Image (tube, rainbow, N blue to C red):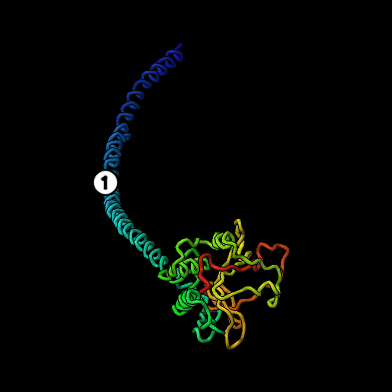
Amino acid sequence: MKWLLVFAILLGAIDAAHPAEESLGTKIKKVFEPEPTPTPSRKHRKHANKASPTPSPTPSAKKKKKASPTPSPTATPKTKSKRKKASPSPTPAPEESPSPTAAETPTPSPPQPSARGKKGAPNVTLSPEEIVEYDTYPPKVRQIIDTGLALTKQNLGYTYGSADPANGGMDCSGFVYYVLRQNGFPDVPRDSSQQYVWVRKAGNFNAVLSRHEDSFELDDLKPGDLLFWRGTYNIDRDPPITHTMIYLGREKRTKKRVMVGSSDGRTYDGKQRWGVSVFDFKLPPPPSSGDAKISPVFVGYGRIPGLSED
């Protein structure tokens, strides 16, 4: 029993020691609890976090970066200003565009002389003394021929649609129209097709079917007669006459038939001429192609309506 009592006392002492130990443990914990004063460390962390924003210099840098873009917009207006400066540059461009147009308007006359230069054959003129039996021609015929030969001395080019030497050139029917109106024929039509009709209606026309220059169909050909061709260029016209000239007679030097007018490539003395000139009167060869519309064909000749034979 004594041992039991002793054992019980010891157990009680041990139990009593446990709360003491616990109190000590709690004390120790309390002692050590200040160590987990990481709470202040949290404050430090907060301070650290606050300090971390101290990289506020970075935002300042950002502000600087933002400041740097601010000049960039200033640069953009410069670019705009450059664009504005560029915008006036196109304005002179349209000013230049009319200038070439103005230059183009007088240019119709230069092309003809340049073409003559390429072919190396200037316009040709003849004096009345170089034409066989010119002195025997009727006065009105000589007057018409003199007017035509005077135009060959003006270095006029071939200008389609022109009937005025002041334009620097004339076309074939424009030449005939101008010469006849200058000599008292106000009713002469303007284009070659209607000039052909004008002659036909007067009953003074001689058709030519032959292609030989010694054909009897040319026996009635006289100086001052109008000459007509078709097929010199492709056009839908009725009657299909496309070319006309004035017959001069025969040249003393060569004894060949010659004519005067405006052409874009007929020949004199074997060389092509471009403009108002004297040309050889030749009957064209047969068409080389199956389409006769694009091959020159001499149709015939006729007296000028109302021309006096005296």
Q: Is residue 129 left or right of residue 101?
A: right
Q: Secondary structure at mark 1?
A: loop
Residue at x 54% of width, y 73% of height: 224
Viewer-side residue, 193 vs 310: 310
Q: Position of residue 28 (x, y in %)?
A: 32, 30
Is residue 257 at all visible to an observer of this figure? Answer: yes
Q: Is residue 47 above or below residue 169?
A: above
Q: Report the residue marked by disc 1.
A: 54
Residue 141 is situated, as x and y percent measured from the top left of the image, at 50, 75
The extreme front residue here reads 310
Using the image as rendered, state which of residue 74 and residue 61 is in the foreground. 74
User: Whole-percent x and y of residue 62?
Assistant: 30, 49
Q: Name which residue lies at 53% across and 67% down.
A: 304
Near mark 1 (Cα within 10 A), the count class, few <14, some 14-19 or many ≥20, is few
**Number of disc labels:** 1
Residue 129 in the figure: left or right of residue 42: right
In this picture, residue 25 sits left or right of residue 4: left
The answer to which image quadrant residue 285 occupies is bottom right
Q: Amino acid at mark 1?
A: Thr
Q: Is residue 7 above or below residue 167?
A: above
- Whether residue 272 is visible here, answered yes or no, is no
Residue pushed farthest right?
A: 290
Q: Give the percent coordinates (x, y) of residue 137.
A: 52, 79
From the viewer's perspective, is residue 175 above or below residue 200? below
Q: Quadrant of residue 249?
A: bottom right
Q: In the drawing, does residue 170 fall left or right of residue 54? A: right
